[in-house]
Image (cartoon, rainbow, N blue to C red):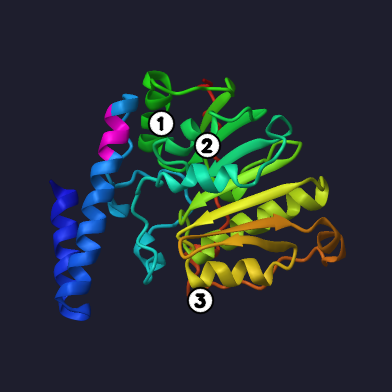
Amino acid sequence: MKQFINKAKRFNRWRRERGLWTTAGVAVSTLAGMAWYKFWDVWHGVETSKEVAFRELDYQIDVYGPNREQYLYPGWNGDYTPSSDKFAERLRSLNLDWKRFVYVDLGSGKGKTLLMAAELPFRKVIGIELSQTLADVARRNLRDARNFNRQCKDIEVIWGDATAFEYPEGPLVLYTLNSFPAPIMQRVLENLRQSLEENPRETYFIVTAITPPVAKQFADYSYFDLIDSSSGHKTYRADLKALGRLVTTPMPSTHSPTDTSAQTPPSQPPGNRDSSF
């Protein structure tokens, strides 16, 4: 019910700002999408469609600091939302030798893309999630899911910090659904850059619902080539030759000079890796 109330408030604001007919079109599209998400859940015996507000997520690892509200900006509200059915199409369009690759969802939420990715024969599928509650839901979904043609049997959900994640060896396919505000995404990209410098390997990164500040970060990190895009996503490939030419100092910080809490290094994740599927 809360999900519908929040959307009703949003539509009312849009009606004032954009007009009745534009808002009506968005409302019809949104309601159709919500119905599809719910049907997907029922068919597969899981729960991924219920949104969770940012303020309700139990982030126990010190990443956002004591004032998480400082990270909110237009285009990023921190809420959990499920990935759309377009994810599978964007993933499959890479047309890779899947058995060579590990799939990693950074901010994996309730595990929806893990289930979809496991229908391809990846070497391994990994989700890393900062909220213990969402990570537990993902494990339950992976356990209970039905009507999937799982070709990857090695699936793991990690409760931990994506900014300090130790990437596995071998080629990677990474994904995120607008999971991080720009200051946190900078730390995610810096951690990834260091991993690729230490162990250069073929890497692809699918980013859905990308915001302009994050798109600029990918452009600033010159080792990413944009290979596919639409109004809803961008797919990048790591340019290992460009990576080899980079100076190994961190990129300039995008934090506000007064934002000291955001500059505090995150604590190490608790290493809760006890669930593999």
Q: Residues within 10 Å of mark 2 (few under 14, many from 20)?
A: many
Residue visible at 58% across and 42% down in the picture: 92
Q: Secondary structure at mark 1?
A: helix
* Disc 2 target residue: 127
Identify the mark nearer the N-term, 1 or 2: 2
Residue sitting at x 47%, y 62%: 181
Q: Is residue 63 left or right of residue 32?
A: right
Q: Residue 209 in the image: state x and y as whole percent.
A: 45, 60
Q: Position of residue 265 (x, y in %)?
A: 58, 56
Query: Is residue 42 left or right of 162 when viewed as pictured?
Result: left
Q: Are marks 3 and 2 in contact (CB under 8 Å)?
A: no
Which residue type carries mark 2? Gly
Question: Could you give the CA–CA distance between mark 3 and mark 2, rounded to whole angstroms?
Answer: 30 Å
Tag 3, which secondary structure? loop
Q: Main secondary structure of the magenta part?
A: helix
Q: Nearer the viewer, residue 132 or 92?
A: 92
* CB contact under 8 Å: marks 1 and 2: yes
Residue 202: give x, y in percent of width and height: 76, 46
Residue 267 in view of the camera: no
Magenta segment includes 116: no
Q: Is residue 110 visible?
A: yes
Circle 3 is placed at which residue position? Answer: 256
Q: Which residue is mark 1?
A: 138
Position of residue 101 measured from the top left corner of the image (x, y, whole percent): 70, 36
**Crowdedness of circle 1 by 10 Å Cα count: few (<14), some, many (20+)?**
many
Towards the viewer: 277 or 57: 277
Name the image quarter holding residue 168: top right
Labels 3 and 2: the sequence-earlier one: 2
Q: For the point 81% across and 53% down, which residue is it?
A: 197
> Residue type at mark 1?
Ala
